Image (cartoon, helix red, strand yellow):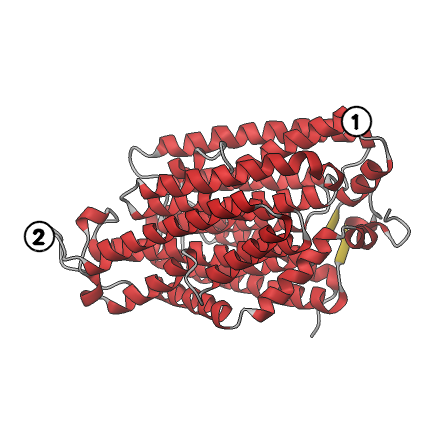
Amino acid sequence: MTLRPDILIALPLALPFATAALLILLRRWVRLQSAVSVLGAALLFADGIALTAAVERAGILTMQSGRWIAPFGITLVADRLAAIMVLVTGFVALMTTLYAVADIPERQTRAGMQPVIHLLVAGVCGAFLTGDLFNLFVWFEVMLMASFVLLALGARAGHLGGAVKYLVLNFLSSGLFLTALGLLYGKVGTLNMADMAVKLRGGDETRLALAAGSLLLISFAIKAGVFPLFSWLPASYHTAPIAVSALFAGLLTKVGVYALLRAYTLFFALDHGWFGPILLIASVLTMAVGVLGAAAQYEIRRILSWHIISQIGYMTLGIALFTQHALAATVFYVIHHIVVKTNLFFLSGAIEQSAGSDRLSRIGGLYRAYTLLAWLFFIPAFSLGGIPPLSGFFAKFALLRAGFEVGAYFALAVGLLVGALTLFSMTKIWAEVFWKEAPEEAPPPRRVAPLRLLPIACMALTTLAISLYPQPLLRYSEAAGAQLHDSSVYIRAVLGKEAAP
């Protein structure tokens, strides 16, 4: 049975909300909650596959809520980028809910952590599919509320300060976003992104529109963790349960990157000559500061948190370069990084369960005791470092090629140096955790719960599949980059054939 396109677009929002509501009703039955949570995530993943296939087959799909035609109603849009992001979100949600069965204590499950995870996933999917800038703000707020609750519920003693810093900086982002919405609506009289693109291109550029674009740039940069607006990330991501940290690491900052991609290829595309150099400098600094911060850390999750920042710099570099190949490289990099980084956080939890700590000085000798865990770590860790033929190599190579085409040699030199330092950090973890002798005071390694290893193995196999057969994802990313670079296709899909400039 083939579902109608409007149903395929609506399900990524309806399924997580329905799952969350059902989980609240089942709050007394922990095992049943876990089963329903995994089932809801599996259905979301299945819909993501169907939606991506439908977009591949039929082109950009739209849904006009209540049959109000754009730009007057609420529009949902699934182009190649949005569809693949929903698919990957479903995959990460499925792996996270599986991991959460073994990771989240019963006390936190009864307190409502599982339904809040699905509310967060709903916010992520809504941000990817919305065609309206105000509704993007609404979905950001859904994510903010859900993520703060998850941090507060799961924070260990003494770590609540990280959750507060996360909340304060993201409130600042929301205030800037809301101010920009007011400025834009006052100028063009619409917040439908396609309609706004037409009106901003058809009218005179004004300082008001430039101010709104600057506010959005800062707001989205905070969400993405771009320099110098990243301090909330390393302060908070290591404080939550592993399943929650992994979900954050894989998805939350990518929503900020997605918003930057959407804004500066659609309705602020003509202003890229002004925004591009700023984003280029910020990207270089993000890469450098993130990797240096990681090199100074000696706890696995802190190292991985700082590396999220450095890798975000690569993604925003592709947006700053603004060629079709650069945008395609950013799409590939985002997909690769979501899978790899989520898995590395899962692995940090498995290492901590086995060794009793995630501090490098207190761990050692796990290769002999747990060879399988060592090789499962090797795949995503050295993919992050860009070792061929793993997926990180193809992601970095595509970005380097795009940079050479426009002569961004300094940024590429920094990218290569950051890649080498990333490899150093991953090698440091590998050597300390698996190769060196275990400290005398270290407890004997324990076996890792099978429900932790299952999602780790699935994600490692996914990384291997992308690494050994990169052509399908590379071709898809090139097509997505072409859609982003030529936004008239998106505009015609939303507003009709006569609307595009």
- How many numbered discs, if any? 2
The circle drawn on residue 206 is: 1
Percent across and percent down for residue 347 are 34, 57
Residue 213, quarter of picture = top right
| Residue furthest top as drawn | 207
Q: Amino acid at mark 1?
A: Thr
The circle drawn on residue 159 is: none
Q: Amino acid at mark 2?
A: Glu
Front-most of residues 212 and 246 = 212
The circle drawn on residue 440 is: 2
Q: Earlier in the sequence, mark 2 or mark 1?
A: 1
Name the residue located 30 percent from the left edge and 55 percent from the top edge.
Answer: 427
Quadrant of the image containing the N terminus: bottom right
Residue 171 relative to residue 340: left or right? right
Percent across and percent down for residue 230 are 47, 35
Local secondary structure at mark 2: loop
Residue 389 relative to residue 19: left or right? left
Percent across and percent down for residue 152 are 40, 37
Q: Is residue 128 above or below residue 158?
A: below
| Residue furthest bottom as drawn | 1
Name the residue located 69 percent from the left edge and 47 percent from the top edge.
Answer: 130
Q: Is residue 125 above or below residue 5?
A: above
Residue 405: tell me if it is visible: yes
Front-most of residues 443 and 292 = 292
| Residue furthest left as drawn | 440
Q: Nearer the viewer, mark 2 or mark 1?
A: 1
Please rate how many residues cluster around mark 1, counting C-alpha atoms within 10 Å: few if below 14, some from 14 to 19, many from 20.
few
Q: Is residue 385 above or below residue 236?
A: below
